[in-house]
Amino acid sequence: MNRNSCLLVLLILSNFSVFSQSLKGVVSKTNIRSAAGNTEISDKVKKPKYYGYTYSNGVSLLKLISNEGTTIDTTFVGDEKLKDKGLETVYTYIKSHEENYYKNFNTNLYRLEVSKRNKNQINKNVSIKDTIPVYNWSLENLNQTIAGYNCKKATTIKTVGPRVINITAWYCEDLPISDGPMDYSGLPGMILQIEVEKNTIIKFEKLKYFKSENIEIVEPTNKTKMLTIQEYIKTR
């Protein structure tokens, strides 16, 4: 075997050892403003939700670990500068008490299982089965440190029905796994932070490699009829 062949074998083995590793982490999701962007929300609603993240052998699962009830909140609608002349409205923030994001990159399978309890304490379940969403990312030459890792910036848009949402991602090339929180993936490294407009921040608070550990990740069980992403959007 010549020298170039030896180097190629070593490179393949090195990449295999990296990708055979497992990752575990904690992700927070914090709402800063309402989805519409023009409504202030209370500190109670701004309280972060926390998720446990696991990746192993091309499969990942993000699972809600904080369990908060539905919040009925009085919010301000209007221009902040004219707050004394604005309108107050009572708004119910329905928080999930079960939420599972599952991605199998080996089979291109995306699953989402969500269970929410509305203000009348009635459960509403959502089951989604589809291919892993694909985003058209634009890479930018900006850096930021997140959870101790050097990250680069990328941007894209997300279309949900009539809405076009601006997404900013921060990804780490030193973690050569093309995954991220929620339904986000597809960058040349692990996505450690997502910014949805200026309204929501989703970020890894902690992330750790487990070099010799293979973790079995089980696909979530559906609690209702499974829909594609587009079918679900049409029901909203």
Image: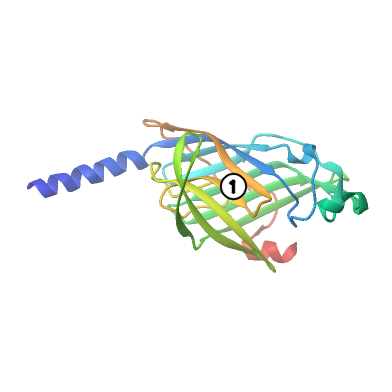
Q: Is residue 228 visible?
A: no
**Is residue 177 among the parts visible in the rendering?**
yes
Question: Where is residue 108 drawn, in percent x and y?
Answer: 47, 56
Q: How many marks overall? A: 1
Q: Name the residue at the bottom extreme.
A: 162
Coloring applied to the structure: rainbow
Most foreground residue, 108 or 4: 4
Q: Amino acid at mark 1?
A: Tyr
The residue under the point 36% across, 42% down is: 19
Residue 205 image-quadrant placement? top right
Q: x, y (%) of residue 43?
A: 78, 37
What residue is rendered at 57% in x and 52% in y? 183
The residue at the point 43 percent across, 46 percent down is 58
Tell me if residue 117 comes above or below residue 140 in the rendering: above
Q: Is residue 225 above or below residue 213?
A: below
* Horizontal side, residue 51 vs residue 2: left or right: right
Label 1 crowding class (10 Å Cα cut-off): few <14, some 14-19, many 20+? Answer: many
Q: Is residue 188 left or right of residue 71?
A: left
Given the current orientation, which residue lies at the most extreme front position?
81
Q: Position of residue 178 (x, y in %)?
A: 44, 50
The single residue placed furthest to the left in the displayed view is 2
| Residue picked out by circle 1 | 101
Q: Residue drawn 87% across and 53% down?
A: 82
Residue 129, percent across and down? 59, 57
Q: Nearer the viewer, residue 153 or 158?
A: 153
The answer to whether residue 75 is left or right of residue 196 is right
Quadrant housing residue 73: top right
